[in-house]
Image (cartoon, rainbow, N blue to C red):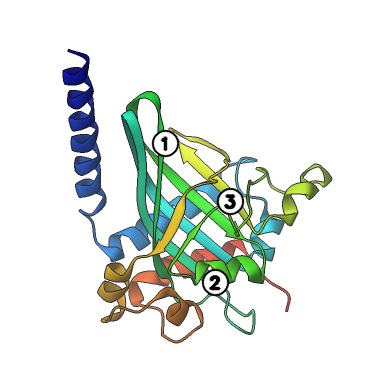
Amino acid sequence: MIKYASRSACRLALSTMFLMDLSAWADTAAERLDESATVLSEVMEAPDQGIPQDLLEDAHCVVIVPSVKKAAFIIGGKYGRGFAVCRNERNTGWGAPAAIRIEGGSIGWQVGGSETDVIMLVMNKSGMESLMESKFTLGGAAEVAAGPVGRKSTAETDAKMSAKILSYSRSRGIFAGVSLGGATLRNDLDSNKELYGKRLNNREILMQKVKAPAAASKLLMLLSRYSKHEA
């Protein structure tokens, strides 16, 4: 009886993860770019609950993953697709978006499902280099910390400023800093091909080797509006 229950639970978990994976792959890269722009706009326009303006201004790169899907029944998992955008070499604007996938899992007694928007600020060149890898784990070589929320960062958050990446999430209208240690970021070559016509890796895109697609215009415009950078 115990073996049967265990096998049933595993089958249910796998089925749930399979359905989650299908829903995650159902939209297009252009639609995800538009959704990423919407997430950024809504977060930055939230009164006293957005990303501090000065942190966004200092960020080397921004990662936005709209609607990270989470499903769990004993075995939990997370999956989402989004984009990384970095400043151009002259710090005069933002470059072309590179598609990424975020993946992570957990083991424990948990039941339920949710969708969460994730935003990460990459605060230095070392963190930017991590983004260009084909795969890296947050909290490993790329130190990640829950980011502060509000219109401006304060002295109380100075300890967090040493992190390479500051991370945030929004679920059910609640926006807050969140620790994403253990999650994995990978190049999404299929989405890059959809946007650029070939399977470019993220290093080729983030090193300003290509022109941003028209579908990214809204996101890039909003990034410019909500941030500025003194070279």
For residue 173, side relative to residue 148 (left or right) = left
Q: Earlier in the sequence, mark 3 or mark 2?
A: 2
Q: Position of residue 214 (x, y in %)?
A: 34, 76
Foreground residue, 49 or 110?
110
Q: Please, is residue 187 above or below residue 14 in the view?
A: below
Q: Quadrant of residue 116?
A: top left
| Residue 104 placement (x, y as % from top left) | 41, 46
From mark 1 to mark 3, how far is it between C-alphas? 15 Å
Quarter holding the N terminus is top left
Q: Residues within 10 Å of mark 1 (few under 14, many from 20)?
A: some
Q: What residue lies at 51% left-to-right and 82% top-to-bottom?
A: 207
Q: Residue at x 41, y 72 (%)?
A: 217
**Residue hosting label 1:** 106
Residue type beneath disc 1:
Ser
Q: Residue at x 67, y 67 (%)?
A: 124
Q: Secondary structure beneath disc 2? A: strand
Upstream in sequence: badge 2 or badge 1: 2
Q: Nearer the viewer, mark 2 or mark 1?
A: 1
Foreground: disc 3 or disc 2: 3
Q: Is residue 81 above or below residue 88?
A: above
Does residue 45 appear in this view? no
Q: Amino acid at mark 3?
A: Gly
Q: How many marks?
A: 3
Disc sitting over residue 18 in the figure: none
Which mark is drawn over residue 86?
A: 2
Q: Residue at x 37, y 24 (%)?
A: 110
Q: Quadrant of residue 157?
A: top right
- Mark 2 to mark 1: distance in Å? 30 Å
**Can you identify the residue that label 3 sits on?**
139
As helix, strand or loop, the secondary structure at mark 1 comes to strand
